[in-house]
Amino acid sequence: MKGLIQMKRLLSGRKAKFGFEDALLGRLNGPDAGRFLQRRTAKPNYSGLPKWGAAMAVARGENLYLAALLSLSCFLVPTMSAALNQTYYVDKTSGAPSVGTQAAPFHTIEEATDILEQGDTAIVAGGSEAAPTLYAERISFGGNDNSGTGGARITVRAEPRRSVLMYGFETDGTDYLTIQGFQITIPAALLSADPDAKYAVFINSDDVEIRDNYFFDLSGWAIRADHDAPWHTRGLITGNHMFRCGVGLTIYGDDWLVEDNDVERLVRDGVLGIDTDYSRAFGDNITFRGNHFHGTLPAEIGSSHVDGFQSFDNNGWYLRNFTFENNIITDFHQGIILESGYGSGNISDVMIRNNIFDGGNLTGAYGVYAKWGVTNLLIAHNIFANMDIHAVFLRFGAEGTVANNIFYDAGANYHADAASPLMGLNNILNREGHPYYSDPSDIVNVDPLFSNANNWLGADGLPFTADDGYRLWSTSPAIDAGTDVGVTNDIFGHPRPQNGLFDIGPLEFGFAPSTSISRVGAADNAFTFGSGSWTVDFSEDVNNVTSDDFSLTTLGDAAIATGPTVSGAGASYTVDITGVTGSAGTIILHFDVGDVVSLAGGLPAKPARGPWFSNVVPASAAMGWVLVFLGVVLASTGAAVIRKKALKH
């Protein structure tokens, strides 16, 4: 066995040049190496061997043949170090021999994936995201018995990100595997030849991570886990964009996280004709967080019934301890559908919180629809908008709690049939629906005062940014009107409650980013005559920061010709003044937070403005700056004195 391991290390730097490469490279690892040699049954391929080598192999039989080839390989194949955590390189445009080094990279992805073992990385070179390099390959890890470990994953990555276009992956038992940064599509010819190609990435391994890939123009699934038992565990699907696919993703297994993915514009074509859904999941302890499902058009889905998320208990399947949080879902027929028709509790302990559901292009018959034996369902702190029938509907014995939600033009709002126990708590219903249901704690027939109910994403068109339309004006009836149902964070992850009281809806109003203001370029806080600058830093991204949010006060003989002018974005800004004159004065910069909107906070009341923040440092022989809060100047001869007051904004 020691000899086999040593030979495998000699060969690990490149794919074998002969037809038995899977024996020499993929199988000679760990305690099964010897057994593999014994069970090898395929007729050996002797092409490429010297005649005497082939004759010796035939004369001694296949097992001895393989052993003989191992000894021959010492001088037939170039050697490289095969220590753990190797990095191999792939570049199809390289003219160098295909060895796997950075100077002489492999020419195909398969050459690299055939030899990867724990801790190894394959870096695939491409063009750019706008003009990716095509590798006409679909990679199966089935020819490689190696897996990574928790501390030494196997990684296949495109560099630059999304600069490589290829035809997908099948993980085939390779555990602790990361696939990152590819563009993936499936041509029609491949789909016809290989039925498994209907899954662009097919996962049948544990501890697989699918990161930052772009899937497009797929008749089938972008990502699909194997539904055959035993299901696979601890998967991560994050940062992927799935565009014009039949189904975004379907997973089966326990302990999965699906986070920060964009599934856009589902299509149903004439090739597979599958029912289009953004997502499905089955298993235990699964979380969907921070995803954006959107953009589907009626003309592109045929007769499909589009669900944002679906789960059911056919075939003995189940969904338990499931969390669906901080997602934005638009353009669906049903936002979430849960069906437990084969036994009470097969779908149970489901938490749907801090999401935005908007029927959009498909009018949204239901936001959440739960049927039969769905138990322990909590629907809390969501927005349901533009629903045709019911935003929430419990039927045929499903049971749950509906609390702290905002129903905005949402059909009959929330409802349950006589067989379904339903508790409603502290919801806002902007209009009564029919059939009408409400709890005495609900706030009925009021406007929740969103910043822009016609555009949840705001002017930048991006989800989860500072201008999103579900932010609240400070006079919203949703503020401080909720109840505690165990939801301790809002859609941005900020803590609930603020000011001791819970808000209704996904956003906890009043989380103010901390602010610091400092002088630029003068340790003694003195201005240089002619100009001066301050930096204004926030603890998170904000927007609407303009020169109107600042004003200046001059004391003594200080004077300013121009300013303030503001530049910057996100969390950092610069305030400049020019034409500074004087000999013994003070310039005070005032900052009004009232019109500044944070990523997490809401808007000020219309048209009120917030209190004044100012930045002041004591005057000196040269012109200095001082710190003022709420219009009070703090005279001092030492360092700046800063007092902060928590604000809602």
Image (cartoon, rainbow, N blue to C red):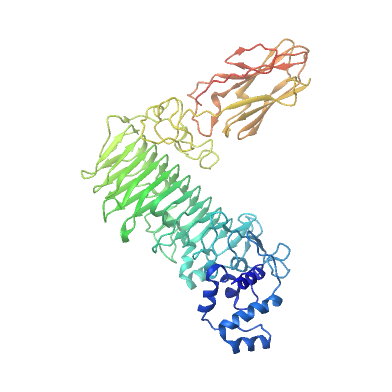
Left/right placement of residue 472 relative to residue 336 reads right
- Give the quarter of the figure containing the N terminus: bottom right
Left/right placement of residue 205 relative to residue 80 reads left
Q: Give the x, y percent position of residue 368.
A: 34, 45
Q: Give the x, y percent position of residue 292.
A: 48, 47
Q: Give the x, y percent position of residue 488.
A: 42, 35
Query: Looking at the image, which residue sits at the far left?
Result: 418
Q: Give the x, y percent position of residue 348.
A: 32, 48
> 484 or 296, which is in the foreground?
484
Whether 176 is drawn above or below 605: the answer is below
> 84 or 106, which is in the foreground?
84
Whether 297 is drawn above or below 203: the answer is above
Q: Is residue 295 visible?
A: no
Q: How many marks on residues?
A: 0
Residue under the image location 62 percent in, 58 percent down: 158
Query: Looking at the image, which residue sits at the far top?
Result: 556
The quarter of the picture where residue 384 lies is top left
Query: Looking at the image, which residue sits at the far front?
Result: 2
